């Protein structure tokens, strides 16, 4: 009898990892002094997440207070350098456009229970979801706290009930699949957003990432994003683009997530001319630029282009999708979905390079722009070759064509998720969805919308390749090399300057002449001594 073939999966139906992990990673807390399966407090029959959290807080008495201060809980960040109010609670993005007003879907990746609208109580510690970070059984998943329409309901059908006692008793330190449950699926699917974060990093090999290599160092996220009182080192809102302190004294620093905090300011051994020259590059070039040659190379594609203008088409009155891209691991990706429009993907993608000093300027819901002049940068990296604070960094560039308020020249909040007549993921009516999204948040809306081209940039720092796969000199120092479009500085091998090139040629000729002359003098002197 012929084996029945498995239907192709559709990883774009997930907004976070909502299926069990077939093979949880090896527990990273094997030296723990606590076995949660032996705690009497956790052996009771729980019926909900808040009940588990209440039990957790009986022993971990300070955890709730600590957790409520981190951005995973608040989704709120005040940038002290620019004064901008950031965080998922506020920002517009180039993927599903906004979380504000769509908490029923987006809050699947909030570390809490029940956030479906503005009535959510951020002061109630029992609303904290402890197990989303600490479940080590691989069986925990999250579903939306509010209902969506039938176009989205398929994502949550046929799931087995969560075994709350089993999940609670399996608690341990977070592993890659815990953090990746959200961060691998950001933007609406596996690998969609970042390009250097996707499900291939749950069980990676050395070729994909030397640090997370399951048969090697087997790092978890918290090896670099070191945690102190539930506050994580490293944030895309406050990037340390040029670490000038190194490893610190003594040992690893706990407040940053930089390459230098482990590898120091001179990461290459000073035992050869080439290594010395590489160390001379570190003040101008980020480690990631050379050591992450391409992204999305674990068999999972990343999204590079999203066009909302084509969304809303139906067949026989129903939404549909077209899956015309098959990624490296054999899974099929949707290239069109009625609820979202058209997509493009890439694998083994060469990053976008730019001078970066760690500062990002964001286009917020209040920012006005002129769509007739140029595209809109949702977030703009800041830096230059001359400021002394920047280095060349790799980024994933994302292009989107998305709605904006044509009368006010601002971006918009769209009401996407919901089981009501105004939710776009059901009515396919941009006008209603935008009007509802803006009114819900007390924002002005002219009543006219159009579409504008936007770009966003995501700093690349994962999928570190083995040293033998790092970039070679001629991949950058070449006429059509990777740094072709970077301006404001002279790069040998890429740029041409008559007087500088002449000086270099004369220096080489002078060096050769000096060596020959020195050799000739030694020969003559030796003959005289003879």
Image (spheres, grey):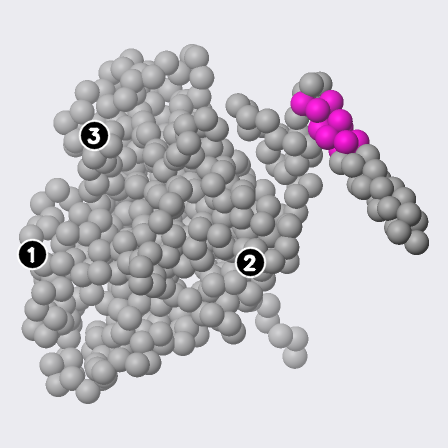
For residue 83, the mark is 3
Marks 1 and 3: which is nearer the front? Answer: 3
Q: Is residue 127 above or below residue 175?
A: above
Of labels 1 and 3, earlier in sequence is 3
Q: Mark 3, residues whose alpha carbon is within 10 Å: few (<14), some, or many (≥20)?
A: few
Residue 509 within the magenta-colored segment of the rendering: yes
Marks 1 and 3 sit apart, C-alpha to C-alpha, by: 28 Å
- Are there few (<14), some (14-19), or many (20+) residues within 10 Å of tag 2? few
Q: SS of the residue at dot 2? A: loop
Q: Which numbered mark, 2 or 3, is in the foreground of this view? A: 2
Q: Nearer the viewer, mark 1 or mark 2?
A: 2
Position of residue 332 measured from the top left corner of the image (x, y, whole percent): 55, 53
First in sequence, mark 2 or 3: give its number. Answer: 3
Horizontal arrangement in the rendering, residue 451 relative to residue 342 (left or right): left
**Quadrant housing residue 1:** bottom right
Kindly state the secondary structure of the residue where label 1 is placed.
loop
Residue 383 at x, y percent in the picture: 41, 30
* Magenta-tinted stretch: 500-510
């Amino acid at each position: 009898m012929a084996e029945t073939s498995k239907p192709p999966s559709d990883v774009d139906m997930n907004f976070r990892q909502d299926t069990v992990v077939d093979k949880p990673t090896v527990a990273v807390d094997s030296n723990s002094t606590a076995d949660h399966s032996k705690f009497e407090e956790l052996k009771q029959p729980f019926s909900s997440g808040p009940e588990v959290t209440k039990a957790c807080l009986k022993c971990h008495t300070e955890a709730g207070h600590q957790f409520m201060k981190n951005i995973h809980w608040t989704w709120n960040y005040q940038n002290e350098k620019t004064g901008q109010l950031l965080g998922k609670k506020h920002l517009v993005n180039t993927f599903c456009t906004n979380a504000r007003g769509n908490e029923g879907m987006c809050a699947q990746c909030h570390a809490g229970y029940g956030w479906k609208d503005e009535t959510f109580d951020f002061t109630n510690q029992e609303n904290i979801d402890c197990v989303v970070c600490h479940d080590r059984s691989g069986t925990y998943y999250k579903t939306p706290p509010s209902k969506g329409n039938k176009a989205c309901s398929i994502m949550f059908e046929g799931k087995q009930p969560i075994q709350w006692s089993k999940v609670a008793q399996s608690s341990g330190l977070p592993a890659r699949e815990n953090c990746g449950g959200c961060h691998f699926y950001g933007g609406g699917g596996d690998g969609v957003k970042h390009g250097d974060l996707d499900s291939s990093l749950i069980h990676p090999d050395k070729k994909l990432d030397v640090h997370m290599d399951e048969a090697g160092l087997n790092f978890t996220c918290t090896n670099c994003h070191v945690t102190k009182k539930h506050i994580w080192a490293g944030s895309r809102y406050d990037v340390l683009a040029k670490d000038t302190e190194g490893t610190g004294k003594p040992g690893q620093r706990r407040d940053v997530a930089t390459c230098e905090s482990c590898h120091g300011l001179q990461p290459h051994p000073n035992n050869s001319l080439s290594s010395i020259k590489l160390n001379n590059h570190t003040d101008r070039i980020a480690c990631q630029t050379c050591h992450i040659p391409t992204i999305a190379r674990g068999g999972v594609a990343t999204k590079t282009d999203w066009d909302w203008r084509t969304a809303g088409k139906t067949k026989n009155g129903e939404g549909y999708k077209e899956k015309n891209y098959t990624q490296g691991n054999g899974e099929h990706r949707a290239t069109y979905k009625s609820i979202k429009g058209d997509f493009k993907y890439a694998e083994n993608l060469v990053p976008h390079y730019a001078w970066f000093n760690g500062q990002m300027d964001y286009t917020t819901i209040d920012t006005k722009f002129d769509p007739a002049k140029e595209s809109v940068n949702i977030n703009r990296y800041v830096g230059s070759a001359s400021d002394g604070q920047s280095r060349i960094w790799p980024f994933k560039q994302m292009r989107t064509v998305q709605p904006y308020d044509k009368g006010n020249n601002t971006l918009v909040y769209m009401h996407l998720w919901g089981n009501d007549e105004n939710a776009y993921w059901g009515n396919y009516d941009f006008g209603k969805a935008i009007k509802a999204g803006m009114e819900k948040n007390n924002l002005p809306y002219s009543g006219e919308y159009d579409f504008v081209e936007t770009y966003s940039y995501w700093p690349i720092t994962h999928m570190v390749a083995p040293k033998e796969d790092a970039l070679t000199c001629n991949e950058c120092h070449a006429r059509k090399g990777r740094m072709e479009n970077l301006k404001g500085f002279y790069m040998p091998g890429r740029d041409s300057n008559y007087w500088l090139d002449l000086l270099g040629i004369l220096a080489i000729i002078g060096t050769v002449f000096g060596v020959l002359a020195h050799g000739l003098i030694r020969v003559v002197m030796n003959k005289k001594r003879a």
